[in-house]
Image (spheres, rainbow, N blue to C red):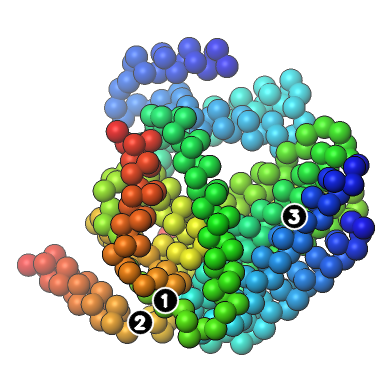
Amino acid sequence: MTHEERQKQHEQASELPKKKKWLPHPVLSVVMVLIWLSLNNASMGHLVLGIFLSLGIPYLVQDFWPTAVRVHRPFKLCMYLLLVLVDICKANFIVAVQILGPNKKLNAKFFEVELDVKNDFTIAMLAGTITLTPGTVSSELSTDKKRLLVHALNVDDVEQAAADIKHRYERPLKEIFEC
Amino acid sequence: MTTFIEYMVAALILLGALFALIGSIGLVKLPDFFRRLHGPTKATTLGVGGMILGSVLFFTAVERTFQFQEFLVSLFLFITAPASAYIIAKAALHLKVQYDAEYIESEAAAKEEQQDQNLS
Amino acid sequence: MLDKVVLIASVMLAIALLLNLYRLVKGPSLPDRILALDTMYINTIALIVLLGVSQRSLIFFEAAMLIAMMGFVGTIAISKYILRGDIIE
């Protein structure tokens, strides 16, 4: 890993636009090595092959993904993932009861969430979180990337629900990826 | 394998199967497309998630080393499920599948307005 | 005991697959059918994980991974075809 870190520092020092970088997505490369090692047996040969692939593939595809993801607060990201997992478990039971109950009680609605986050990756993270928590599905992003259309299975107060999403998920994401 | 772990594995597998079943019941029972869309997200998250957790626990107990490869399936599903739900919803909006009529009208009006602005 | 639990769980998943098949055949609109197909993929993954537990073999995990990938690509391709009338632009 020390070799990679040195390369990363070198990369940040000499940053030129329009030039192919050797390490365009450092976080992605590390994650790729870890996933390769857990897919195969963790041996020395697979480590070398994994490092080779995780440097080669991002180099070849960097034109498709121009902005690198930067995690500003790793600890907060872990806390956020835990929060989402707990929410998924809680909401699953609520939605299970709602699905098995009578259909007439369900008050399904569309509502829009005004987005504060600008980065494409952050918007994708937020939309993914909204879909994974049962009861809400994000269904369309407006063309100017400012509003997200969300469908909720059972909601009474639309503005309260939108405010909940903003407060609970959007604010931590903004702090983690954009500040 | 101790009895306690066996009970845990059994409980997790049953929980996963139950949630997958409830998701599919929702797919059949709910009245319109956008309500049905909520069923599969449940089946993905806690259904397959619970089952994979049970399986990981089982193999860890049997092999006596931590077998975490199966978490990759769960991780992959957690990343891809929102993308496929989003694109199916988008296709449904494109085909104008029946749902709240009010919203369709307001959105169509907004789009026309935007096109007019682009033209002028 | 675990064998019985696995049997009960696979019966539950088989019922879930039949319900999905019903929606796939009947589904009033095209997105309903895509959704049913996607749910079938997910239930199949659960069934394969269950098969791995009952056979006490870790090999099935790779099959589950492959089905997850194929299912995702298939769903995206069909939806994209509906949206644009073309898959690769």
Q: Residue at x 60, y 53 (%)?
A: B77
Mark closest to the chain's N terminus, 2 or 3: 3
Q: Position of residue A78 (x, y in %)?
A: 50, 35
Can marks 1 and 3 be said to lie on one chain? no
Badge 2, how many Cα within 10 Å: few under 14, some, many 20+?
A: few
Secondary element at tag 3: helix
Quadrant of the rendered image containing residue A155: bottom left
What residue is pinned by disc 3?
B12
Q: Residue furthest left?
A: B120
Q: Position of residue B65 (x, y in %)?
A: 82, 32
Left or right of B75? Residue C54 is right
What residue is pinned by disc 2?
B100
Quarter of the image that includes the N terminus of chain A: top right
- Discs 2, 3 touching: Cβ within 8 Å: no
Distance of mark 1 from mark 3, alpha carbons? 31 Å
Nearest to viewer (mark 1 / mark 2): 1
